[in-house]
Image: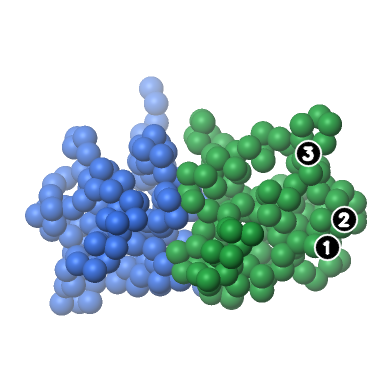
Chain colours: A blue, B green
Amino acid sequence: MADKPSIRRKGFQYERELIRLLWKKGFACLRAPASGSKAKRIIYPDLIALKNGVILVFEVKVRSKLEPIYINKEKVNKLIEFCYRAGGLGFIAVKYLGATNWRFIPIDRLEATSSGNYKITKELVEKGLNINDLIRLTRKESLLKYLNK
Amino acid sequence: MADKPSIRRKGFQYERELIRLLWKKGFACLRAPASGSKAKRIIYPDLIALKNGVILVFEVKVRSKLEPIYINKEKVNKLIEFCYRAGGLGFIAVKYLGATNWRFIPIDRLEATSSGNYKITKELVEKGLNINDLIRLTRKESLLKYLNK
């Protein structure tokens, strides 16, 4: 009987699933090393995807239940700094187990909670971008439209 | 007495040194996970650095002696494919132990050997870009000049 994988390993499993999907769609991808946290003061997002010179930066959240997702403000601030340095667009990549599709929520749509942390409601996930929206962002005209909206 | 670190660990140590340098210069960086090779058919370079929407992709080579560096053609081809997908510029990042500075050799300058592999001569390393040249590449006007040269 197989062991139940640890939460950390399970997270990696879904990150790899997302990488395979992005790779199939023509992106170059890189995920952060597990030992990344050893390098002090240096920020690593979970995953980045690159296409046509467009930089997409992701934190990956996998949830077993269809409930709101809370994200630590330090995590969001780090994602924002990474995107600022890179000149990239930041997203929370969300997968609800059982759902087939990933949803990508732009970081500027996150809702602040009274504690200063961030929240993604079920509705925000439903209105999130899908994989084809991400591909459209990598076409230059679309990116300009997105940034000017 | 400390153990002599394995070659693999030593490689990581210099990758981290390079990341710290790039980070200090304002780049966002990501290095490939050690377990990257588990994801079949997906290509990971050693390191990427991002700034102002410019994507730099690196294979890292550290050598104890000032001698030519040979690089497997499959490795170079993978780096080229990653760069093509990403819309990025590929480099071999070279550090000779004892030398203070890193040198960055654009992949299109590599010399093919009779076996189809690639070679970086000492002279090619000396003519390589330095960290300030990389920063200049992330300014849009310079990048256009670089691509048109």
Do the numbered discs 1 and 2 sit on residues whose CB atoms are within 8 Å? yes
Residue receiving disc 1: B126
Evaluate whether residue B91 shows in this view. yes
Q: Amino acid at mark 1?
A: Glu
Q: Residue at x 72, y 68 (%)?
A: B130
- Decide which of tag 3 and tag 1 comes sooner along the chain: 3
Disc 3 to disc 1, how far (Cα)? 18 Å
- Is disc 2 on the same chain as disc 1? yes
Q: Residue at x 59, y 58 (%)?
A: B148
Label 3: element kind: strand
Disc 1 to disc 2, C-alpha distance: 6 Å
The picture places residue A91, in percent across and down from the top left corner, at: 30, 58
Which residue bears the numbered disc 2? B122
Residue farthest toward the right in the current orientation of the protein: B66
The residue carrying mark 3 is B112
Q: Is residue A4 above or below residue A27?
A: above
Q: Nearer the viewer, residue A123 or A38?
A: A123
- Compared across the picture, whether A97 is left or right of A42 comes to left
- Mark 2: amino acid: Lys
- Image quadrant of residue B70? top right
Residue A65 rendering spot, x and y as whole percentages: 16, 45
Q: Residue B7: x percent and y percent?
A: 76, 48
Query: Residue at point 81% right, 49% down?
Result: B120
Q: Camera-side residue: A109 or A51? A: A51
Q: Label 3, label 2: how many angstroms apart (C-alpha)? A: 15 Å
Helix, strand or loop at disc 2?
helix
